[in-house]
Image (spheres, coloured by chain):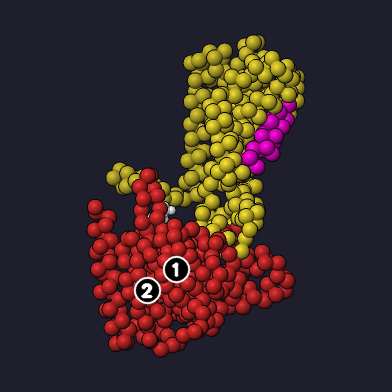
């Protein structure tokens, strides 16, 4: 206690109006994230996870409420909050190296320093040898590794990830989760991660917030006391399985509600 | 017979590629078929040469056009007019289209006007432009401009609108300012689409120039064609049409080659 939270989400509401109809996407969400913490927001499809993350990124304005990063109110997107989307957002006309360099170049950093940082992150995400490749030559998993490296190279205060592995096959996805924990162990960035995959949430996080079906609220908060560093074998440990059961029960209720939502 | 049909069926898989050899042979076969029917009708004497001269006749007429009637100059004149009108339209239209696809305010201001004008056929402006500008190059270039510009603006706007929103948002989260988003994301992302648009537009420009030259001109391919018609030189008419086709294909290939050379990163 006493330490100021890195990120504060305070009484955030979001209403979308679509063809004259108002949709309450997020209802009164408040939560706090500590410095260097890996936090995940877990919720069924359509519950408002992306909306919440976009509000933190400053890409969507909340209808009510505020987000504070290090006590400062967020009013728009900025390089202090790096973002990785589910869809592939690499700039296709830039090589792997140039993509990772994009933010550094904008900041006007010295060229030699840029090169150094780019090289460091290329190695961290295991893409040595692919510096000169264009995105079209990369697999889905490699693209997301570049996207993560690009966001991290910019040295943001917090990294926001919106289902970054959602489009990958199960094996690649599992490998990417391990890579992300390694990167986190290494850099200890504050991370806010969004997923609807229970196992992914538990494996990666220190803390998981479970959201309700639309309108999205925080339904529960689960501490993940699993030891670190983590590896994939832990996924079959008893502690892991118990946490998974607990989270699954919560998310299942909401998923059922979500399907009923759609029918009406 | 059964096995032949089965083998034939193998070449008709929806969207599946066929061998390059077969592809080339089929392309040739298509051309050869047309030539054969043409030759049969003309050399066989089934059709009067006044309606359709033989391939040999057409070549001869073309040869004469080049040697005696200065057809080279006509081709150069038409090419110059097309390129001048097209370039002016591109220089003004590409930036305007980009702005329109980027800023809703520009779209609101420009769209209704351009959306309306583009439905007016360029050829209908010919009488008006002759009245205003005479029958010289300026009038021809103006027709090309009207025929190209408005379509171009709208098509470039669509290209710019097609840049994925998340790509732009990623740039913002990497610290880009508005002007940098335009220069470093919207512009490079739109370039391949813009070049494609230019390729299509220049093809249309070739059709407008012929119409403009048919109506009133003292030189150009269209002028040669209408002159040949007056003198019942059907072979020259057909030769003129074929030359336009060849010029169109050359321009098209030049653009495609440029595309591959400039944008090796485009996903195919
Ligand atoms: N720009 C928008 N305009 C209107 N409605 C929107 C908009 N963005 C999101 N919504 C609605 O808000 C709700 C929450 O959407 P959101 O994308 O945040 O959900 P999600 O939890 O990320 O879902 P998924 O798991 O499918 O990604 C949905 O009902 C969606 O239709
Ligand atoms: Mg989402």
Horizontal placement of A257 versus B192: left or right?
left
What color was chain B assigned in the picture?
yellow
Above or below, A116 against B98 in this view is: below
Tell me the tag on residue B126.
Answer: none
Q: Is residue A214 above or below residue B139?
A: below
Give whichever of A71, A83 is nearer the camera: A71
**Quadrant in the rendering for residue B145:** top right
Q: Position of residue B4 (x, y in %)?
A: 34, 45
Residue A146 visible (yes or no) = no
Q: What residue is drawn where x is 32% and y is 84%?
A: A240
Does the magenta portion include B9? Answer: no
Residue B48 lies, with reference to residue A258, above or below; the image says above
Which region shows up in magenta? B77-97
Of the pair A174 and B14, the residue shown nearer to us: A174
Residue A106 drawn above or below residue A203: above
Q: Which mark is residue A10?
A: 1
Residue under circle 2?
A: A209
Residue A135 vs residue A214: left or right?
right
Chain identifier, red in the render: A
Q: Position of residue A142 (x, y in %)?
A: 50, 69
């Amino acid at each position: 206690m006493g330490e100021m939270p890195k990120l504060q989400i305070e009484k955030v509401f979001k209403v979308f109006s679509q063809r004259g109809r108002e949709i309450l996407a997020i209802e009164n969400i408040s939560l706090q994230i500590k410095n260097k913490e890996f936090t995940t927001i877990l919720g069924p499809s359509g519950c408002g996870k992306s909306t919440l993350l976009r509000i933190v990124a400053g890409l969507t304005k909340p209808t009510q409420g505020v987000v504070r990063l290090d006590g400062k109110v967020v009013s728009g997107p900025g390089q202090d909050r790096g973002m990785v989307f589910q869809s592939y957002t690499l700039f296709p006309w830039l090589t792997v190296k140039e993509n990772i360099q994009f933010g550094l170049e904008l900041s006007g950093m010295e060229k030699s320093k840029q090169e150094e940082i780019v090289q460091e992150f290329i190695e961290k995400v295991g893409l040595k040898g692919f510096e000169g490749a264009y995105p079209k030559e990369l697999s889905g998993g490699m693209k997301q590794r570049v996207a993560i490296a690009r966001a991290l190279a910019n040295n943001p205060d917090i990294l926001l990830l919106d289902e970054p592995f959602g489009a990958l096959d199960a094996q690649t996805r599992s490998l990417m989760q391990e890579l992300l924990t390694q990167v986190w162990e290494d850099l200890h960035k504050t991370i806010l991660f969004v997923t609807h995959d229970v196992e992914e949430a538990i494996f990666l996080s220190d803390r998981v917030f479970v959201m309700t079906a639309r309108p999205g609220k925080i339904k529960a908060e689960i501490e993940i006391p699993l030891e670190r560093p983590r590896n994939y074998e832990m996924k079959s440990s008893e502690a892991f399985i118990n946490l998974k059961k607990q989270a699954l029960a919560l998310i299942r209720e909401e998923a059922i509600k979500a399907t009923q939502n759609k029918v009406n | 017979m059964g096995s032949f049909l089965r083998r034939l069926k193998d070449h008709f898989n929806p969207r599946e590629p066929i061998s390059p050899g077969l592809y080339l042979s089929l392309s040739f076969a298509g051309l050869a078929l047309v030539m054969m029917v043409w030759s049969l009708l003309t050399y066989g004497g089934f059709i009067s040469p006044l309606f359709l001269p033989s391939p040999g006749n057409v070549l001869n007429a073309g040869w004469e056009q080049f040697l005696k009637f200065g057809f080279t100059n006509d081709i150069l004149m038409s090419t110059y007019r097309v390129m001048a009108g097209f370039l002016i339209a591109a220089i003004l239209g590409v930036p305007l289209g980009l702005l329109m696809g980027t800023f809703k305010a520009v779209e609101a201001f420009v769209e209704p006007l351009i959306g309306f004008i583009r439905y007016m056929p360029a050829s209908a402006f010919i009488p008006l432009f002759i009245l205003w500008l005479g029958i010289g190059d300026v009038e021809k270039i103006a027709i090309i401009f009207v025929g190209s510009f408005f379509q171009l603006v709208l098509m470039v706007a669509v290209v710019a609108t097609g840049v994925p929103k998340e790509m732009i948002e990623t740039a913002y989260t990497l610290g880009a300012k508005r002007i940098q988003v335009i220069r470093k994301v919207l512009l490079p992302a739109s370039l391949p689409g813009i070049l494609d648009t230019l390729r299509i537009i220049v093809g249309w420009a070739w059709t407008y120039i012929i119409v403009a030259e048919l109506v009133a001109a003292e030189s150009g391919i269209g002028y040669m064609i209408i002159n040949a018609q007056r003198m019942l030189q059907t072979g020259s008419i057909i030769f003129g049409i074929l030359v336009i086709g060849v010029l169109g294909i050359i321009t098209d290939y030049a653009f495609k080659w440029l595309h591959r050379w400039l944008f090796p990163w485009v996903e195919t």
